[in-house]
Image (tube, rainbow, N blue to C red):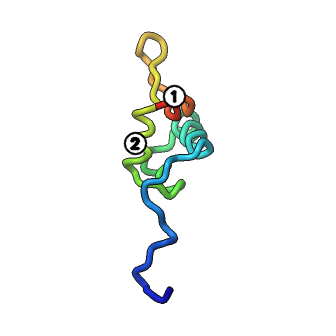
Amino acid sequence: MDNPNCNTGHKKYQHLTSEERHIIEVRFNEDKWTIYAIAKSLGRPYNTIKNEINRGTVYLYNGKIARYKADKGEEA
């Protein structure tokens, strides 16, 4: 195609893969990356990463510590 506005290379509304969820878990919990930095490194929108972290967050020690778990995010 010669159309410069053709965007077939970028597909919207794709699900996160299990590898991406694992990367989010490691970078958010252990490496203490910000949501913005994780989104930029994965090439995903900020809101996608924020929603995934909210979806997969579990509370430990009677709700005192919040951790993102990739398995819980994938279940939801």
Residue at coordinates 48% horizontally, 53% vertically from top-left? 14
Residue at coordinates 52% horizontally, 47% vertically from top-left? 16
What amino acid type should be assigned to the residue bearing mark 1? Lys
Q: Tell me the residue that label 2 is attached to.
A: 50
Residue at coordinates 46% horizontally, 23% vertically from top-left? 58
Residue 26's quadrant in the figure?
Answer: top right
Provide residue 67's location: percent of width, then percent of height.
Answer: 49, 27
- What secondary structure is found at the residue carrying circle 2? helix
Return the residue nearer the eye: 1 or 73: 1
Provide residue 32's location: percent of width, then percent of height.
Answer: 51, 38
What amino acid type should be assigned to the residue bearing mark 2? Lys
In the drawing, what numbered circle is on residue 24?
A: none
Return the residue nearer the eye: 12 or 55: 12
Along the polypeptide, which appears first: circle 1 or circle 2? Answer: 2
Provide residue 51's location: percent of width, then percent of height.
Answer: 39, 40
Whether residue 51 is situated above or below residue 66 in the rendered picture:
below
Whether residue 48 is situated above or below residue 22 in the rendered picture:
below
Q: Tell me the residue that label 1 is attached to.
A: 72
